[in-house]
Amino acid sequence: MTLRSCGLCVAMILVFPFVVAAQVSLTITSTPATLTVGHDTIFFPGNVSSLATTISPNTSTPLATAGVTLTASTLTVPVGSYHGFVSQTFTVNGVSATMNRVVDVFAGPSSHLYNIQSGPATLELPEGSLTFSGSTFFGPVSAPGTLTSAGSTDDWLLIPHPTTPNTFTIYTDFPMSTLGGLVGNLVGGISPQQVTFIPNVPATIAYINFSGFFTTLPTSGGGASTTVATTVTVNGVSTPVTRTLSTISTPSQFCTTDTALSRTAASITADLGPAGKVDVTMPAQTNAGEHDCGQPIIIVPGSLNVTLLLHDVPASSNICPLSHGFWRNHAQAWPVTTLTIGGITYTQAQLLTVLGNSAGGDAVAILADQLIAALLNIDNGSDPSPVSAVIADAQSQLTGINLLSHTDVPTKSASGQKMLADATVLDSYNNDNLTPNCTVKVPGQ
């Protein structure tokens, strides 16, 4: 993987095992395209005749959809690096998407080398999100000379539409744009990936910089600014967003002059109807290791983070219970800020104090930890039926006992044994042992 391409980077922050699905039939066509880089000619013939094939979901499949003819110029062309990009339209099962191919030409004294980095591009099919990209190196090609019908492939991946609540396929497009003397890709895109997270708990995923900005000689400079329109797609719902890109000239520890690239933060809210809403926040970045040192390309860092937040999800989502340790360490995820236990109402701060105290041999504290977690789980959408009777009994046993200031009840006492019995059942419930039909699981909990 280069600094400017990740192929099909499919990351999962909370991973569900994939369901085995039948193969999907694809009919693929693509338009031809020709590009001049420096004095060399690069021709992509495209798939004018339909390519019929099948792929398996969730499996990266190489397909020969990127044939190319490379014609090296004469040796009179100055030695150096040259860069350009070209777009092709791919149509798959009647749905079209634009694939951007970035071409680097390294013109040496006797031969030329070529690096072609493509995509990723994503389109929505009835079966799921189909994404394809690639990176291929050719050469050396003796100049002058032609490498005809060079073999090349793109990697294709079909991510089926999510079937589990609170699971989302998310990605951005990767538009090409100009910036002063630069031409390049909108860095900071999200490669297609499927993620699952619980409501109201912020989560982060990496987003991949597919390409830097490049230019032919003379090299780039500062003071340019442009806006780029892009989209963020979540479960097939595309939301537009605008990023502002700019360049500045800065001192560098590596070279005399340096052109740095910066981009503004951006955020969107994807409204998915009954599935809830997903906030997607992409941070700003300025001068974060991007430089050209007087060369005709700006190198970008490998990845940054995007913050995701799921909210406004109906309570009937049947979320699997979570442990008291989870609730102790994720106060921002609490569905309520007060609970009534034993007839006494406690604030969130007081309940966190109870959860943070060492229970030791105190049956009251042991039962309180599990009861707090069980009540939070139920308020968060977990099925209460397996423990309704136990919760009622636990509430009765804790009636009149102040959880913040009380006399310990030894676990070996008669009343302590009854509390431990309830706590044991609630602990099993909170660790998802009594709700086999729940649909939203958090690995590690």
Image (tube, grey):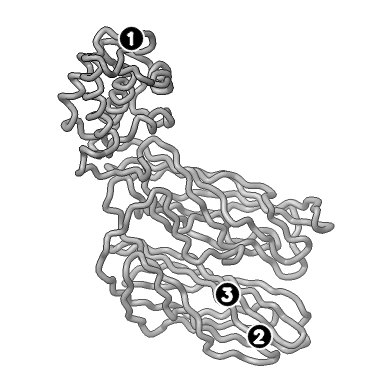
The amino acid type, in three-letter code, at marker 3 is: Ile
Read off the residue under disc 3.
116
Residue at 43 percent of width and 75 percent of height: 62
Locate residue 320, reporting x and y percent.
27, 39
Q: Residue 402 has which mark?
A: 1
Residue at 71 percent of width and 86 percent of height: 111
CA distance for labels 2 and 3: 14 Å
Residue at 56 percent of width and 71 percent of height: 117
Q: Residues within 10 Å of mark 1 (few under 14, many from 20)?
A: some
User: Which type of secondary structure does the marked residue at label 1 adopt?
Assistant: loop
Give the number of callouts: 3
Horizontal side of 392 relative to 152 (left or right) equals: left
Horizontal side of 252 relative to 192 (left or right) equals: right
Mark 2 or mark 3: name the one nearer the start of the chain.
3
Q: Against 322, is 275 above or below?
A: below
The amino acid type, in three-letter code, at marker 1 is: Asn
Q: Residue furthest front?
A: 412
Q: Residue 140 has which mark?
A: 2
Tag 2 and tag 1, C-beta contact below 8 Å: no
Locate residue 270, reporting x and y percent.
39, 45
Q: Against 168, is 182 above or below?
A: below
The amino acid type, in three-letter code, at marker 2 is: Pro
